[in-house]
Image: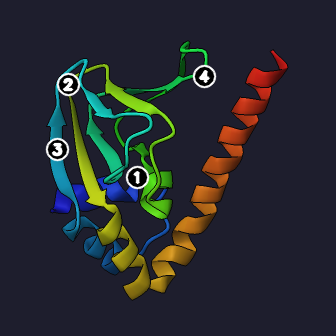
Amino acid sequence: MKDNIKLLKNVSLFSKLNEKHLTTVARLLHEREYKKGETIVKQGERGIGLFIIKSGKVKIEKTLQNGKKLDIAEHGPGEFFGELSVLDDKPRTASVIAIEDTTTLAMTHWEFNALLKENPQIALDIIPVLVERFRETNEQLLELKIK
């Protein structure tokens, strides 16, 4: 668990949390392994939760209405994905595929929501990070639209 707490300190979503809150979060994480080429989450399917990359690398891929696949980003250790589905329990907006053998730490949306209800300070500490991620995504989409 100490390794997971150390990792969480370097994950932007959790970097502002104190040691007590980091320990609380770490207790809820479940390690999952994926082989290179394996789809971790699929666009349009209901999301189970939030993922933090412990090792390996993933690509975020969006399938457009015309069927064209668009590579949005690549994420490596210490980065996270699935934050939208964990908050709104709606279908995934993109697919995430392992481009290397990848190990993640996952937290289900019901665990995440219970965590925030029991620890409102955690919510206050992570909201600015989520808003920043949303702003970055909007900016990327605007740039794509202009091109």
Question: Which residue position is annotated with label 4?
Answer: 65
Residue 124, image x, y percentages: 56, 76
Mark 2 secondary-structure assignment = loop
Give neighbour class at mark 3: few <14, some 14-19, many 20+ (Cα, 10 Å): some
Residue mark closest to the camera, 4 vs 1: 4
Q: Is 107 placed left or right of 33 in the picture?
A: right
Question: Which residue position is annotated with label 3?
Answer: 32
Question: Which residue position is annotated with label 2?
Answer: 101
Residue mark closest to the camera, 4 vs 3: 4
User: From mark 4 to mark 1, how far is it between C-alphas?
Assistant: 36 Å
- Of labels 2 and 4, earlier in sequence is 4
What's under tag 4, amino acid-wise? Gln
User: From mark 2 to mark 4, how far is it between C-alphas?
Assistant: 30 Å
Question: Which residue position is annotated with label 1?
Answer: 10
Q: Is residue 111 above or below residue 65?
A: below
Residue mark closest to the camera, 3 vs 1: 3
Residue mark closest to the camera, 2 vs 4: 4
- The image's colour scheme reads rainbow
The residue depicted at 48 percent of the width and 34 percent of the height is: 94
* Closest to the observer, 107 or 2: 107
Give neighbour class at mark 1: few <14, some 14-19, many 20+ (Cα, 10 Å): some
User: From mark 4 to mark 3, how far is it between C-alphas?
Assistant: 31 Å
- Of labels 3 and 1, earlier in sequence is 1
Residues at marks 4 and 1 touching, judged by CB atoms closer than 8 Å: no
User: From mark 3 to mark 1, how far is it between C-alphas?
Assistant: 19 Å
- Identity of the residue furthest to the front in this view: 66
Residue 50, image x, y percentages: 36, 53
